[in-house]
Amino acid sequence: MAKESSDPAEARPSRRSTWRRFKKNRGATVGLCLIGLLIFIALFAPVLAPHSPDALDLQTVCSPPSRDHWLGTDELGRDVLSRLIHGSRIVVVVAISATAVATAVGVVLGLVAGYYGGWVDTIIMRALDVLLAFPGFLLAIALVAFLGANTLNIVVVVGLTRIPRYARLIRGTVLSVREIEYVQASKAVGSPEIRTMLLHVLPNCIGPTLVYASLTFGDSILTISGLSFLGIGVQPPTADWGSMLSRGREYLMVAPWLAVCPGAAIFVTVMAINLTGDGLRDALDPRG
Amino acid sequence: MYAVPTLLAAIVCVFFLMHLTPGDPIRVMLGVDATEEEVDAVREKLGLDRPLLTQLLYFLRNVARGDLGESIYFRLPVLSLLLSRLGATVELAGVALLIAVVVAIPLGVVAAVRRYSLVDSISSMMALTGVSVPSFWLGILLLYFFAVKWRVLPLTGRAGPPWTVEGLRHILLPGMTLGATLVASTTRLTRASMLEVLNQDFMRTARAKGLREAVVIYKHGLKNALIPVVTNLGLQMGVVLGGAFLTETVFAWPGIGRLTVQAILRRDFPIIQGTTLFLAAGFVLINILVDIVYVLLDPRIRYR
């Protein structure tokens, strides 16, 4: 009995019980609601924003929060709240795309390396080790500096820096699943390898993938805003949280809200994602 | 030991960085108003007019000699520029590491021993905040409160080594900013690792021997719980080195990060290439050191 319960497949909780455990976690529920709210804001930005994000009003330059401008205006008289609302679109789109790139490539590489083993495994993992030799943010900076800062490059670069750890995680899961009886059985009856991989091995990777995807999503937002902050991210005049913060820093003495608001937006977003990710991990792995 | 081939492959990758630039990197570097002669001169100087394989071999030879090329803006060797800024970055990383060790390890231990207590809740709140907060924003907030509003600490820059009063006052805010993420992950890991150790048989044995609780926890517990913590600190140095780019930019700290960020804005490619190489080498070296410390901490681990 004890042996069976240590079997990863046996211990895999049903979807319903996972959801029940997730709902019980207050932090995770709040996090998930905040993410939903963020996506809602991003989708309906033009309707929700009280002003146009690019409308200049040189009469009200750097005015503090007021009834007309809830979060004040910036150095060109643009409404900070409206720019934040529109900026959420960039963050959501770029971070989700980067996470998708990292997930797709990382899962495939990890699956192939773990399933086939041998020299395939060696080549994939050694190549990824080379990527790991570079501190992630440094690699992102260097690649963007040479490739040029545009949205597509940022998505690819941020995604790329997350691939190695992803692949390692999935490979580890695959290694532990590979020897389970039903996988062996599927091989023994002569199913095509690809069928065994997708039908019997891959489902076991869904849990770790979900948890790691949430971590990657949060991390990507920090990396993307960091790049913008350094001036090599999404290029102005597009409203973007990182570059808003970077410009706001120059007006710290006269208009601190210009730096405080976009930073708070990044912070709350990443915190919500991390809360959700933690809740997901606890719900998927009740033993941990 | 895969460190040496990994590092070699990393150097080759850095070589190809320059070739990633769309269009002519020299044109991009020198700007639109450079003459054809100037462009050719730089191209020849960087060896970009030779076949790719020859370029690669030259590059490897130069790296082996410690020649990382010359900065276009400063007209100085990249290596000496990096070395002149290295001290400031190491100092900053050291203070961040020190803050992490002094704050996070005791906090993690107390959080584990008094599980579900107030300290435990505070420590998990801190950990969550630390991994979620954008470091550049945290830096700006600290700057705003301590330097602008209350005027108790200086605004930016570096003023000598951290053991002098002025030096310490200048490094405090950037050190805290850079250390925040490290505090978060270290607290979390110390707590988790300690919780695991607390249930081990040898802990019961130590208590049964009648040792004082403090001795049991710190000598028998913490020493065993530290192994994953040390490994993580080593791995996190990569994050710290990356974070230095942001922190140094916020606080105008004259280190490698600021040098590189300015180089990016000036399109001074040799510096960017040099930094990437330099920090990757440093990171690989740190990982080797972590392996060594690992063996020292845990006599059960032996390398073949």
Image (cartoon, coloured by chain):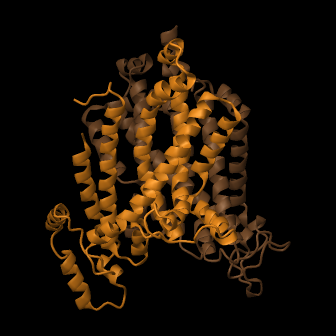
Q: Is residue B93 left or right of residue A45?
A: left
Q: Quadrant of the C terminus of chain A?
A: top right
* Residue B33 placement: quadrant: bottom left
Q: Does residue B283 sit above or below B209 in this rendering? A: below
Q: Residue at x 27, y 28 (%)?
A: B302
Q: Is residue A45 left or right of residue A119?
A: right
Residue depicted at x 21% and y 75%: B46
x%, y% of residue B194?
A: 53, 29
Name the side, left or right, on which A73 lies relative to A205. right
Residue at horizontal 72 percent and vertical 34 percent from the top: A23
The reply to whether residue A233 is visible in this rendering is no
| Farthest residue, direction top | A1
For the image, the number of numbered tags is: 0
The chain drawn in orange is B
Q: Position of residue B136 (x, y in %)?
A: 56, 63
Rendered view: A192 above or below B189: above
Q: Quadrant of residue B195?
A: top right
Using residue A67 as the reference point, say whether residue B67 is left or right of it: left
**Residue B226 versus residue B31: which sits nearer the camera?**
B226
Q: Position of residue B247 (x, y in %)?
A: 51, 63
Above/below status of B93 relative to A75: above
Which chain corresponds to the colour brown? A
How far across and how far down the image is residue A40, in percent? 72, 55
Work out whether residue A136 or residue B133 is closer to the camera in this orientation and state it: B133
